[in-house]
Amino acid sequence: KVWVGHNILRFDSARIREAFAEIGHAAPKPAGMIDSLDILMNKFGPRAGNMK
């Protein structure tokens, strides 16, 4: 299973793990992650982070 999200590497993956911990379960382990923020930063540079 691959996790895909915008800023998932720096933000969402930690929140997902915290949410599972709160209910007493281990978070699933992704086979990989695709972060759309990283893709945009590679294509458009720093302006992709603030969308200006």
Image (cartoon, grey):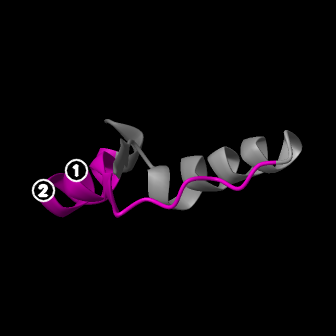
Give the residues in magenta.
25-48
Image location of residue 9, percent across then percent down: 47, 60
Q: What residue is shown at x 12% (from left), y 56% (from top)?
A: 43
Name the residue beneath numbered marker 2.
43
Please say whether residue 33 is one of the residues in the magenta stretch: yes
Image location of residue 51, percent across then percent down: 33, 36
Image location of residue 1, percent across then percent down: 34, 51
Which disc number belongs to residue 40?
1
Quadrant position of residue 10: bottom right
Q: Is residue 44 left or right of residue 4?
A: left
Instruction: Name the kind of residue labelled 1 in the image.
Output: Leu
Q: What residue is shown at x 85% (from left), y 39% (from top)?
A: 23
Q: Residues within 10 Å of mark 1 (few under 14, many from 20)?
A: some
Q: Are marks 2 and 1 in contact (CB under 8 Å)?
A: yes
9 relative to 40, above or below = below
Q: Could you say which is closer to the camera, residue 21 or residue 7? A: 21
Instruction: Name the kind of residue labelled 2 in the image.
Output: Lys
Q: Could you say which is closer to the camera, residue 14 or residue 41? A: 14
Q: Is residue 39 left or right of residue 27?
A: left
Which disc number belongs to residue 13?
none
29 relative to 44, above or below = below
